[in-house]
Amino acid sequence: MDPTRAHPPDLGPGEFAMVDPPPRAAVVASLAETLTRAVALGDEMAARVVHEAIGRLLGVAPAPEGRASSRRR
């Protein structure tokens, strides 16, 4: 029996169905790439801004400004 829209083809071992990510997940993935580039280039300010944007998209409250610098000691 040939696959139809109601009956997709069976996936073999180790195969994954292709699905479009939700829009927010796609934005977070893009920002993660930007964060990686900012860190690699040593741009601390850009990394902080992108990190905060990712946190906001994920619903995480930003840490107080003094807390981040106290971790470096």
Image: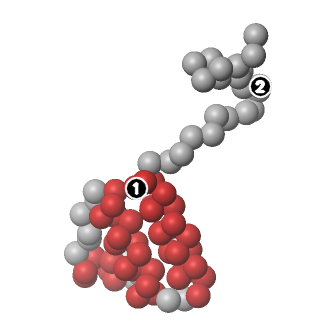
- Front-most of 64 and 16? 16
- Amino acid residing under circle 2: Gly
Q: Earlier in the sequence, mark 2 or mark 1?
A: 2
Q: Nearer the viewer, residue 56 or 69?
A: 56
Q: Which mark is residue 12?
A: 2
Question: Could you say where residue 71 lies in the image, as x and y percent from the top left?
Answer: 37, 76
Mark 2 secondary-structure assignment = loop
Using residue 9 as the reference point, say whether residue 36 is left or right of it.
left
Residue 20 in which image quadrant: top right
Q: Is residue 12 left or right of residue 43?
A: right
Secondary element at tag 1 = helix
Q: Do tag 2 and tag 1 residues touch (Cβ < 8 Å)? A: no
The residue at the point 27 percent across, 76 percent down is 67
- Residue pictured at 45% horizontal, 61% vertical: 28
**Could you say which is closer to the camera, residue 20 or residue 36?**
20
Left or right of 70? Residue 45 is right
Name the residue type under label 1: Arg
- What residue is shown with label 1? 24
CA distance separating discs 2 and 1: 30 Å
Please identify the quarter of the rendering in which residue 62 is found. Answer: bottom left
What label does residue 55 carry, if any? none
